[in-house]
Image: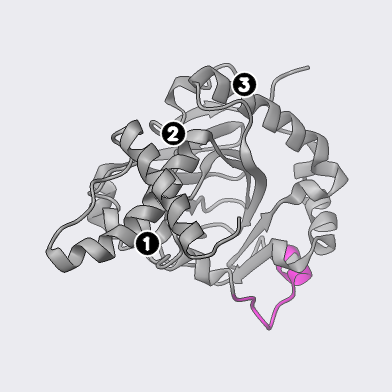
């Protein structure tokens, strides 16, 4: 069976830096606009988010998709996406049978990459995400609380991605607040792109976006863009997530003394201690999970 990820993927760079590679999924029937038009209206409503109108790079990406355009249904959005400024984001399309086998195969390949990098044997909380966007549409600047492999199937885009843990692009307080969902609108300016790399992206190409790496996307002007990502966490990124959450709480306490916590992502031992402290903190607060 032909692998979904091509041989130019770099397992050693997983969550270390963004990089382009290739995928072998062009022509997959699940990703045709016809199949998507059939599948999307059947999915539970919370899994299908869409917006009307072009977004700005500095918009609050997550809050935008908490609101649905009242004057246009999902079916109308799909039908008119070639000629209107629309953006559709679909969470977990793998619940539909047409995506089930593809999802399992991608998870298997992610597992192999994780084992090669020594960060676990299987992806944690993995999901597929679909993105269908009108020409010239923008995905605002944000970070992800997981690792991503993004694959392009139709149209083109420019994905501008920074290095993870680059405080010049996303400050430590903003990174921590974003991870705990206290603030999902990150400061952005054109000058910040000097600390990032712009990847030109076309069908058949894929991109790794590391855990919490700042990024934004602009789709090409010529065609509807269809892309899909598999998102997941590793044992390592889960420790980072916990440590960032603990830092957010600790920062508020230390601020009273004019102090701030040490950063995450620079010491595996320190991150593990903070992860453990975060779980203790949750138990003290009565969180059962």
Q: Earlier in the sequence, mark 3 or mark 1?
A: 3
Residue at mark 2: 15
Sequence-wise, the earlier of marks 2 and 1 is 2
Q: Label 3, secondary structure: give it.
A: helix
Disc ID at residue 177:
1
What number is the disc on residue 112? Answer: 3
Image quadrant in which you'd find residue 165? top left
- Give the residues in magenta: 67-78
Q: Position of residue 140 (x, y in %)?
A: 44, 60
State the quadrant of the N terminus: top right
Residue 36, x across and y down, in percent:
78, 52
Q: Helix, strand, or loop for circle 1?
A: helix
Reply yes or no: does residue 201 show up in magenta.
no
Is residue 74 highlighted in magenta?
yes
Query: Percent from the top left, x then y, of residue 263?
Result: 26, 45
Crowd band around label 2 with a 10 angstrom C-alpha radius: few (<14), some (14–19), many (20+): many
Alpha-carbon span between mark 3 and mark 1:
32 Å
Instruction: Locate residue 36 relative to residue 49 in the image: left or right.
Output: right
Count up the numbered dots.
Answer: 3
Q: Residue furthest left?
A: 258
Q: Nearer the viewer, residue 109 or 58?
A: 109
């Amino acid at each position: 069976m032909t692998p979904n990820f091509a041989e130019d993927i770099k397992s050693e760079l997983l969550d270390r830096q963004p990089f382009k590679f290739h995928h072998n999924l062009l022509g997959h029937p699940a990703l045709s606009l016809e199949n998507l038009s059939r599948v999307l209206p059947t999915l539970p409503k919370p899994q299908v988010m869409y917006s009307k109108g072009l977004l700005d790079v500095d918009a609050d990406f997550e809050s935008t998709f908490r609101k649905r355009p009242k004057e246009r249904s999902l079916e109308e959005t799909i039908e008119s996406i070639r000629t209107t400024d629309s953006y559709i984001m679909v969470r977990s399309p793998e619940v539909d049978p047409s995506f089930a086998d593809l999802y399992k195969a991608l998870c298997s390949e992610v597992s192999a990459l994780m084992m090669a990098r020594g960060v676990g044997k299987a992806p944690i909380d993995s999901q597929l995400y679909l993105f269908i966007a009108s020409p010239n549409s923008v995905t605002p600047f944000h970070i992800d609380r997981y690792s991503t492999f993004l694959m392009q199937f139709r149209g083109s885009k420019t994905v501008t991605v920074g290095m993870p843990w680059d405080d010049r692009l996303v400050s430590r307080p903003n990174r921590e607040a974003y991870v705990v969902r206290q603030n999902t609108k990150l400061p952005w300016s054109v000058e910040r792109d000097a600390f990032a790399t712009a990847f030109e992206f076309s069908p058949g190409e894929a991109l790794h976006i590391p855990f919490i790496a700042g990024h934004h996307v602009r789709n090409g002007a010529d065609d509807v863009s269809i892309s899909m990502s598999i998102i997941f966490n590793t044992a390592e990124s889960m420790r980072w997530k916990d440590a960032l959450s603990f830092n957010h709480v600790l920062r508020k306490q230390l601020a009273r003394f004019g102090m701030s916590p040490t950063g995450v992502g620079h010491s595996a031992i320190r991150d593990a201690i903070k992860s453990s402290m975060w779980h203790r903190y949750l138990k003290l607060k009565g969180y059962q999970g």
